[in-house]
Image (cartoon, helix red, strand yellow):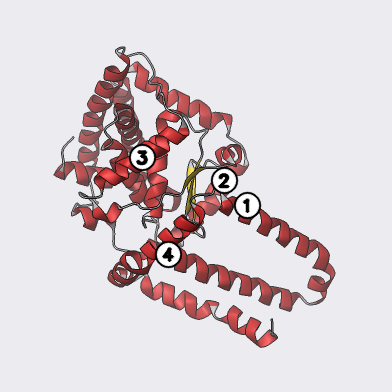
């Protein structure tokens, strides 16, 4: 590649940053021309292209790129040391191409209109409203747990494997399309992450590869949590980037599933977020509420806690800090804490559609 062209591509990063910054203040434009314009065609194209492959092509591509990058550094370290500015230019060139592609194929969805506008609900709440929703979720979760097990002390064991959970989640999206057309999901590309153990060590339940539009789900996650995780990742595929919004989508789609095990998964998931919110502002009230939860539900929470404890390691907080910085750079000012913002959306939704 000619040096002038390389310089031009590297320098194009500056106008890209300016353009994306402007789009961040223009959600109506993003919503109309990107999220509901070109993105559905881009995402479906990639899912048709790669969805039939039984393994994650994106993970393979990432692995190859890392190997190629390390090999390049090893072979050319003397040249890099001799011409550091040229190397820096090449790094910026790569970043420029990456940034352009990342935004084109998926990331502009970070700047679309809030999902609360799609549902015509508010997304600000009071502590009293959070407590009220928590109490209602306790009743609902207890009721579902007892309906499944017939014993309030028995842990719910979801009798499905990962593939069945995938199929039931895809079917649930299909049933919701008439009611919620903005969540229409066509040409599924849903796969089990081949790096499940590694993902667990990083604290990841699932992720979307934005460059291939493959949704990866960490299938070694406790099964009672998998339905919500699966629906969450599809939420990213249909065009919602912010984590609080895809958490809400994952909850809602799973809650509306006809299967009682899915309803329990959604209810237990929502309850855990509400309990965490209560715990942040009133530890004693949290303890009182937790004591009202059936022992079987508590056992499911302990199962998830033990799973997370098993994979706890010194690197996970570092990864989460990096991911939190990434989220803050993409319209999520609360960083990784934005996951918990699902509570505001649930309060608004259930104010309009009571449990």
Please identify, in this view, whether the residue under mark 1 or under mark 2 is nearer the observer. Answer: 2
Q: Are marks 1 and 2 in contact (CB under 8 Å)?
A: yes
What percent of the width, then of the height, locates residue 10? 60, 78
Q: Where is residue 181 in the image (x, y as percent from the top left)?
A: 24, 54
What residue is shown with label 4? 42
Q: Which of the two labelled residues, at mark 3 and mark 2, occupies the earlier sequence position?
A: 2
Q: Mark number for residue 60?
A: 1
Quickly name the residue at label 2: 55
Residue drawn at (20%, 38%) of the image: 128
Percent position of residue 110, x then y: 39, 61
- Element class at badge 3: helix
Mark 3 crowdedness (10 Å alpha carbons): few <14, some 14-19, many ≥20 = many
Q: Which of marks 4 and 3 is nearer the N terminus?
A: 4
- Classify residue 271 as left or right of residue 179: right
Q: Quadrant of residue 230?
A: top left
Residue carrying label 3: 169
Q: Give the image quarter of residue 297.
A: top left
């Amino acid at each position: 590649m000619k040096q002038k062209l390389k310089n031009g591509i590297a320098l194009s990063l500056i106008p890209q940053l300016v353009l994306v910054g402007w789009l961040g203040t223009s959600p109506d434009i993003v919503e109309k021309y990107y999220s509901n314009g070109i993105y559905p065609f881009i995402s479906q194209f990639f899912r048709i292209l790669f969805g039939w492959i039984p393994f994650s092509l994106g993970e393979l591509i990432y692995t190859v790129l890392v190997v190629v990058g390390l090999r390049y550094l090893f072979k050319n370290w003397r040249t890099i040391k001799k011409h550091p500015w040229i190397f820096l230019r090449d790094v910026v060139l790569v970043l420029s191409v990456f940034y352009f592609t990342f935004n084109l194929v998926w990331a502009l969805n970070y700047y679309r209109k809030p999902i609360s506008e799609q549902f015509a609900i508010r997304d600000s709440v009071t502590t009293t409203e959070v407590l009220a929703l928590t109490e209602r979720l306790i009743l609902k979760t207890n009721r579902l747990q007892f309906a499944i097990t017939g014993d309030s002390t028995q842990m719910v064991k979801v009798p499905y494997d990962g593939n069945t959970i995938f199929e039931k989640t895809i079917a649930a999206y299909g049933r919701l399309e008439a009611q919620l057309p903005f969540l229409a999901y066509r040409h599924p590309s849903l796969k089990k992450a081949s790096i499940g153990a590694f993902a667990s060590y990083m604290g990841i339940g699932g992720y979307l590869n934005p460059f291939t539009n493959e949704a990866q789900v960490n299938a070694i996650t406790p099964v009672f949590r998998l339905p919500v995780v699966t629906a969450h990742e599809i939420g990213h595929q249909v065009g919602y980037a912010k984590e609080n919004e895809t958490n809400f989508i994952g909850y809602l789609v799973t809650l509306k599933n006809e299967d009682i095990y899915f309803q329990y998964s959604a209810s237990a998931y929502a309850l855990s977020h509400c309990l965490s919110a209560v715990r942040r502002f009133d530890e004693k009230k949290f303890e009182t509420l937790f004591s009202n939860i059936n022992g079987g539900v508590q056992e499911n929470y302990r199962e998830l806690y033990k799973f997370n404890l098993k994979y706890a390691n010194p690197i996970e907080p570092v990864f989460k800090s990096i991911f939190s910085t990434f989220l803050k750079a993409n319209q999520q000012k609360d960083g990784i804490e934005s996951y918990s913002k699902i509570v505001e959306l649930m309060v608004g939704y259930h104010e309009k559609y009571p449990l």
